[in-house]
Image (spheres, helix red, strand yellow):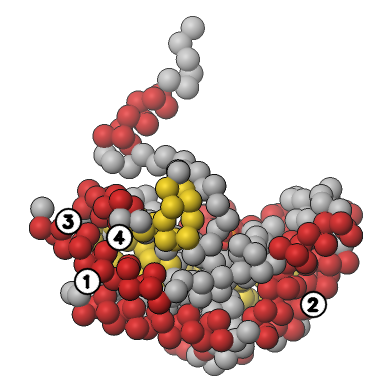
Amino acid sequence: MPNPLSWIDDELQTLDAGGLRRHLSQRSSTQAATIEIDGRQLINFGANDYLGLAADVLNDVTRQAINEFGWGSGASPLVSGRGRKHAELEEALAEFEGTEAALLFSSGYAANVGAITAVAGKGDVIFSDAKNHASIIDSCRLSSARVQIYPHRDVDYLRMMLPQAGGFRRRLIVTDSLFSMDGDLAPLADLAALAEEFRCMLMVDEAHATGVFGETGRGVSEYWNVESGVHIRVGTLSKALGSIGGFVSGSQQLVDWIANRARTYIFSTAAPQAIAVAGLAALENVRSEPHRRIELLARAGELRQELHALGLDIGGSESQIIPIFLGDLTRTMLAVTTLGERGLFVPGIRPPSVPEGESLLRISLSYAHTPEMLGQLVDELERAVGNVQGT
Ligand SMILES: *Cc1c(COP(=O)(O)O)cnc(C)c1O
């Protein structure tokens, strides 16, 4: 009998031929400024651990929490899975965000899917930035709402689209606040003004900005002082907060509704309470060690200037995420290999993560990087990308 999965071999061969096949790598060190990956020691520019919390800062409290609360949560939050520490973290997140309430999910992906499908459905319309994160794209598709994509950060275009939204039951504008590949910021003040004018809900995904941007680390909404115009805010514990998990924050009515409707909340087991304890410790770190985010963003600014001075195309990055746009897939993956041989891990981003012909190197800076590491990065990029350009 023919193997009903034999088509997969053909598909994988096509990926191979196009240089698009992903291979699972294996890290055998902690997730820190240097990592051992596939047997090689490399300086790590491929983690979203922006504040340097992932490897060790949260270990002790988490260990204690496991002893006190046990590991598994064993059920959905609504059944018996939500423990005292989950509740405490939700309260702390609401306080941190300056909102009435917050709701904890097991990942940022789940938070986006849960929130978007809870607030938008059949008969509604969603306006979504063309470069929004995949979890937002998937959420929009799942919601059954009409989805209107506007060009990246193009508020003029969005303004032209919005008048047609009047006939829909509910209207939602959704955007990343700090875009995960380009490192640029959404025009939140303009989006908030449009949301008000056209009576839309505004949802902002602060995944890469939580803990990094804003006076107290709440994100780009705080940085640009537009928090009152944002109705639904999503963040993760998985990036700057060094752990795993996601959350939605906003008004009490919003959170009550999402807890009643978000299928990724209702039909998924609560994360271990130790993770909530790690989240509490990370929030405390953001509060008590602001120098981490301040120095991170200062160094990111210097690095962007240096790379720009080398003639590298870093697009519109304004953050700790710095892309180097190389365009060509082969050129990009060759640069990744060369940098690896020189002791640096800088991931190449290629289709389907980005459109054809828009491949890039994605540098992710951390507070844990030393000035020497950044110096080495600049030197090796000059060599590697220069070399690639020469071929
Ligand atoms: C990473 C990311 C997510 C998903 O968060 P996880 O906690 O990793 O699931 C959601 N939105 C954006 C913009 C992201 O970059």
Is residue 369 shown above or below 318?
above
* Farthest left residue in view: 390
Q: Which of marks 3 and 2 is nearer the N terminus?
A: 2
Q: Which of marks 2 and 4 is nearer the N terminus?
A: 2
Mark 3 or mark 4: whose residue is earlier in sequence: 4
* Disc number lying in front (2 or 1): 1
Relative to 32, say whether 227 is above or below. below
Task: Work out how far the residue at label 2 is from the one at label 4, CA to CA, in angstroms.
Answer: 39 Å
Residue at 10 percent across and 53 percent down: it is 391
How many marks are shown on the rendered structure?
4
> In this rendering, is residue 176 above or below 343?
below
Residue, disc 2: 91
Q: Quickly name the residue at label 3.
A: 388
What whole-number distance in Å separates the C-alpha atoms at marks 2 and 1? 44 Å
- Residue under label 1: 312
Q: Is residue 329 toward the left or the right of residue 155 in the image?
A: left
Q: Nearer the viewer, residue 389 or 349?
A: 389
User: Which residue is pictured at 48% across the width and 51% down the height?
Assistant: 36
Q: Is residue 125 visible?
A: no
* Disc 4 target residue: 360
Circle on res. 79: none
What amino acid does circle 3 point to? Val
Q: Which residue lies furthest to the top in this view?
A: 1
- Mark 2 or 4: the one toward you: 4
Q: Which amino acid does label 2 sit on?
A: Glu
User: At 74% from the left edge and 50% from the top edge, which residue is drawn?
Assistant: 268
User: In terms of secondary structure, where does tag 2 sit?
Assistant: helix
**Secondary structure found at label 1:** loop
**Does residue 384 appear to the left or right of 223 in the view shown?**
left
Contact, mark 2 vs mark 4 (Cβ under 8 Å): no
Residues under labels 1 and 4: Cα distance?
A: 11 Å
Q: How crowded is mark 2: few (under 14 residues within 10 Å), some or many (20 or more)?
A: some
